[in-house]
Amino acid sequence: MEAFYTIQGEGAHQGKAAYFIRLGGCDVGCHWCDVKESWEMDQHPRLSVKAIAKEAAQFPGRLAVITGGEPLMHDLTDLCEALHQSGFKVHIETSGAHPLSGDLDWITFSPKKFKAPLPEIYSRADELKIVVYNKSDFRWAEQFADKVRPACKLFLQPEWSVSPKMLPQIIDYVKANPQWQISLQVHKFMQIP
Ligand code: SF4
């Protein structure tokens, strides 16, 4: 769908320069999704993995983030290989609703209520990122915290449109449950993509 060099604004790698590769296609259907234009896979051009990796390599950073849409609707084996050949670390942001593919260096698992994740991701996720839209999401988040491996980092992130309401609740929750950390979409504060 698009690719751009920017700053990773969320999670454990927040603040790092990264080349984002946004793949078209998503069948998860979050009502608050801020990239609904990504949903229809066929509305986006098909590019070769070589062309994507070549474009990425024009920038100095060597961190690539594959996102979407739901990127695991594609087999990522060849894309990961091409990016690795150009010296990239390859990160992914996924709902976990489709099978994992590709040699991934960091997996951000962000489950959604609208389509259940596949259990294979629990033992592979490096960070669990729960987008908090309402109060019931705290209880929902804990279900996943119980399933991921102990080394997996735990993040609560306010959904942007309800952030003024939910952030104070997240702050209180993290103070009471310090195994969690807060993730903010700092790229939005910086007004960059
Ligand atoms: S999984 Fe991501 S891209 Fe898909 S609907 Fe939800 S927020 Fe949007």
Image (tube, rainbow, N blue to C red):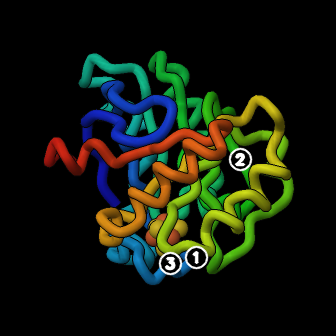
Total number of numbered labels?
Answer: 3
Label 2: state its secondary structure. Answer: loop
Check disc 1 and report the residue beneath it. Answer: 28
Contact (CB < 8 A) between labels 3 and 2? no
Q: Nearer the viewer, mark 1 or mark 2?
A: 1
Q: Position of residue 30 (x, y in %)?
A: 50, 78
Check disc 2 and report the residue beneath it. Answer: 101
Q: For the residue with label 3, is its CB less than 8 Å from the closest atom of ligand 1?
A: yes
Image position of 35 (left or right of 77): left
Figure quadrant of the N terminus: bottom left
Q: For the residue with label 1, is its CB less than 8 Å from the closest atom of ligand 1?
A: yes
Tag 1: amino acid: Val
**Residue 30 tag number:** 3
Image position of 137 (left or right of 148): left
Tag 3: amino acid: Cys
Tag 2: amino acid: Ser
Asked whether residue 115 is in view, the answer is yes
* Between discs 3 and 2, the one toward the N terminus: 3
Which quarter of the picture shows residue 190?
A: top left
**Residue 148 tag number:** none
Contact (CB < 8 A) between labels 3 and 1? yes
Vertical position of residue 12 compared to residue 164: above or below = above
Q: Nearer the viewer, mark 3 or mark 2?
A: 3
Vertical position of residue 99 compared to residue 108: above or below = below
Q: Residue sitting at 61 percent across and 69 percent down?
A: 137
User: CA separation, marks 1 and 2?
Assistant: 18 Å
Q: Position of residue 104 (x, y in %)?
A: 64, 34
Q: Position of residue 193 (x, y in %)?
A: 22, 49
Q: Residue sitting at 62 percent across and 46 percent down?
A: 176
Q: Position of residue 61 (x, y in %)?
A: 33, 20
Return the residue nearer the eye: 33 or 75: 33
Label 3: state its secondary structure. Answer: loop
